[in-house]
Image (tube, rainbow, N blue to C red):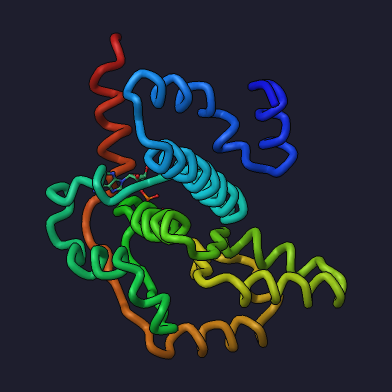
């Protein structure tokens, strides 16, 4: 087989990670007079790396998250009373394995969604199946769905390792599904970490700084 044929065979075998770096690895092996096993190990690693990042990307897409927030870019000095250690504790994701829940409540713009999304994103990176949704949208879709679709939606809430329902207590449609809402809250309060976010709105601070730089 020549190079083209080898590459084609690799793609046919769905070893695209090896196919992509093959010519580089061949050059590297020749340049360094590398033992065969060393080259082979590097090629296997390329395949593993590609599969892992592909899987992570697919998990992120499926999660419904719209961005990739992190606790690293969170300014803990802005609202010093936030439950910082409890946030990092959630970020270890131990609660998922323990089948526990977390409820984040508090003032607007203090970073509740940011913290919840950061934990959810971390969970996608660690291989968990995650669903993020805004409670209002989720409940509205549920309220309008047929019985069959409702069963599917319930499955989509229950099946993932981590379900994040944002703005739960703002949900207008919660009244439409009163019985289910009670069940959801009842389950939620069982083995539940409570995180309270008190402080100033970061949104207002950002808006204020925009006004400050707008020329008159
Ligand atoms: N301490 C902080 N450091 C950095 N960014 C922050 C901080 N607090 C909030 N933000 C940013 O401010 C914006 C608003 O925060 P977020 O949406 O998380 O607030 P919230 O508590 O969920 O508000 P709401 O109750 O209205 O849903 C987001 O863009 C978030 O990234
Ligand atoms: Mg929010």
Please identify the quadrant where the C terminus is shown.
top left
Can residue 143 be seen here? The reply is: yes
Q: Residue at x 51, y 88 (%)?
A: 187
Relative placement, left or right, of 132 versus 72 is right
Please identify the quadrant where the N terminus is shown.
top right
Query: Camera-side residue: 97 or 49?
Result: 49
Relative placement, left or right, of 183 versus 110 is right
Query: Camera-side residue: 102 or 109?
Result: 102
Q: Is residue 207 above or below residue 64?
A: above
Q: Residue at x 42, y 37 (%)?
A: 36
Examine the image and state in which quarter residue 10 appears. Answer: top right
The location of residue 68, given as percent across then percent down, is: 43, 44
Query: Camera-side residue: 78 or 208?
Result: 78
Q: Residue at x 30, y 15 (%)?
A: 214
Q: Residue at x 32, y 79 (%)?
A: 193
The location of residue 26, given as percent across then percent down, is: 48, 24
Q: Is residue 135 above or below residue 110?
A: below
The location of residue 130, given as percent across then percent down, is: 53, 63
Examine the image and state in which quarter residue 84 appears. Answer: bottom left
């Amino acid at each position: 087989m020549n190079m083209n044929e080898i590459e084609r065979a690799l793609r046919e075998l769905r070893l695209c990670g090896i196919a992509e770096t093959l010519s580089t690895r061949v050059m590297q092996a020749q340049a360094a007079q590398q033992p065969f096993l060393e080259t082979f190990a590097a090629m296997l690693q390329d395949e593993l790396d590609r599969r892992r990042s592909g899987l992570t990307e697919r998990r992120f897409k499926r999660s419904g998250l719209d961005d990739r927030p992190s606790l690293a870019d969170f300014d803990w000095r802005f609202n010093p009373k936030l439950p910082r250690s409890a946030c990092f504790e959630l970020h270890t994701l131990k609660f998922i394995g323990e089948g526990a829940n977390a409820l984040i409540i508090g003032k607007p713009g203090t970073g509740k969604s940011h913290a919840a999304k950061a934990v959810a994103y971390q969970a996608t990176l660690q291989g968990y199946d995650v669903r993020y949704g805004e409670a209002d949208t989720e409940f509205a879709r549920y309220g309008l769905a047929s019985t069959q679709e409702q069963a599917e939606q319930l499955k989509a809430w229950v099946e993932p390792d981590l379900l994040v329902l944002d703005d739960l207590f703002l949900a207008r449609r919660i009244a439409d599904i009163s019985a289910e809402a009670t069940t959801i809250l009842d389950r939620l309060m069982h083995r539940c970490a409570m995180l309270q976010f008190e402080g100033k709105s970061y949104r207002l601070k950002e808006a204020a700084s925009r006004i400050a730089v707008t020329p008159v």
